[in-house]
Amino acid sequence: MHQPISATLRDQTLELLASGAATNRGDLVEALQVAPSTVTAVVRRLIEEGVLEEEGVGRSTGGRRPRILRLRDTDGVLAVAELGGRHARVGLCGPGGALRVSEEVPIEIGAGPKHIFDVVSETFDRLRESVAPGQPLLGAGVALPGPVEFPSGRIVGAARMPGWSSGDPAKILANSFGGLIAPVIVDNDAKAAALGEFATRDDEPGDMIYVKAGTGIGACLVTDGQIFRGGRGLSGDVTHVRVADSGERRCSCGGRGCLETVASGAALARQLAEQGAPDMSLNDIMVAVNDGDPAVVTAVRQAGRLLGVALSGLVNFLNPRAVVVGGALSSLDVYVAATRGMLYERCLPSMTQSLTIEASVAGPDAALVGLGRLLRSTVSS
Ligand SMILES: [Zn+2]
């Protein structure tokens, strides 16, 4: 039987060794501030998993020099993908979780998991052929644009993903890789992106609320470097928070006045269509803002303000160090600035004094980077 070790401790240990901040058990005890017996348990487990090796085992009787711990150069790749409504971003991570390559392929999310995972695994095979030919697959992870129960990976009532609720995405994903036995993770896209954002930042962001604002809106709280998941793993569903001044429009969830109906890319497109500009894609909206189209800029600013309204309650409740806006809309300064302005207006000064509110730095690969991190901590030999 394995003694259970916490994912945080495992992750921190790997980080310390990878960065060179720790090279032996004594360093780890000091850096992690835990008992030597705890470090022994973590190190033993990582050695068993083949992730770590300890130099000088068997020669320990002679001197007092500590034995050096080293990460093993393992072969292999992790397959990662993030699905959107119309596109999938597919990538390849090394065994340590670092993203090596990524590309975008067109999909139609309504085609259902089997068809889409076949497209994803074909893309992945092609990437592997060009970047890491012959290397074994150590694990696979997919981020989905809807509420995902964790760790089961089942979709829970995603209105924008018809055909996904009945099956077991993790199983279908494994099958599309030819019955892969390695770990398979299915997670929500905002959660994966939040972890990717956290990992990408050089500074220590501390407790962070991450919002993914694209066609839809998702969010995640990262605390102590880990995703806060809640009871069923469904935390972060800010999109169905009811917002005042929202016009009480009916939402896909059956309620009225949800954030999704006023602050998402889909909501913006609908509002602009009602004002006589039909069929604007998210990309069209971004181009129009950059061109200074006054009607579009006004709509985007109002959407950002309403996002700020929905987040203000969370900020007052949680007192995070950072609010980070990611997703396609985060590239629009007017959207992020409006969110920031509303947070300053609605939150207690004591909360905003130590709060940073800014756009994501991780870019379009954020979710892939996050999936790599998640897989790194579950992959074992
Ligand atoms: Zn709703």
Image (cartoon, rainbow, N blue to C red):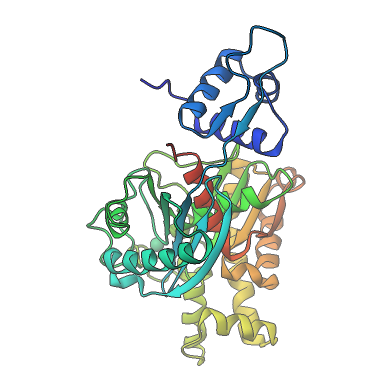
Q: Is residue 366 left or right of residue 133?
A: right
Task: Tell me the quadrant of ligand 1.
Answer: bottom left
Q: Position of residue 220 (x, y in %)?
A: 52, 50
Q: Is residue 358 left or right of residue 326?
A: right
Q: Position of residue 3 (x, y in %)?
A: 42, 20
The quadrant of the image that shows the C terminus is top left
Asked if residue 353 can be seen in this view, the reply is yes
The quadrant of the image that shows the N terminus is top left
Q: Residue at x 64, y 73 (%)?
A: 301
Q: Residue at x 46, y 27 (%)?
A: 48
Q: Position of residue 185 (x, y in %)?
A: 39, 48
- In the rendered view, would you say 128 is above or below 138? below
- In the rendered view, would you say 18 is above or below 177? above
Residues 335 and 199: in front is 199
Q: Position of residue 335 (x, y in %)?
A: 65, 70
Residues 323 and 198: in front is 198
- Residue that lies at the very extreme toward the left in this rendered image: 166
- Residue that lies at the very extreme toward the bottom in this rendered image: 276
Q: Is residue 142 left or right of residue 366?
A: left
Residues 210 and 302: in front is 210
Residue 165 falls in which quadrant of the image? bottom left
- In the rendered view, would you say 297 is above or below 160? below
Asked if residue 213 can be seen in this view, the reply is no
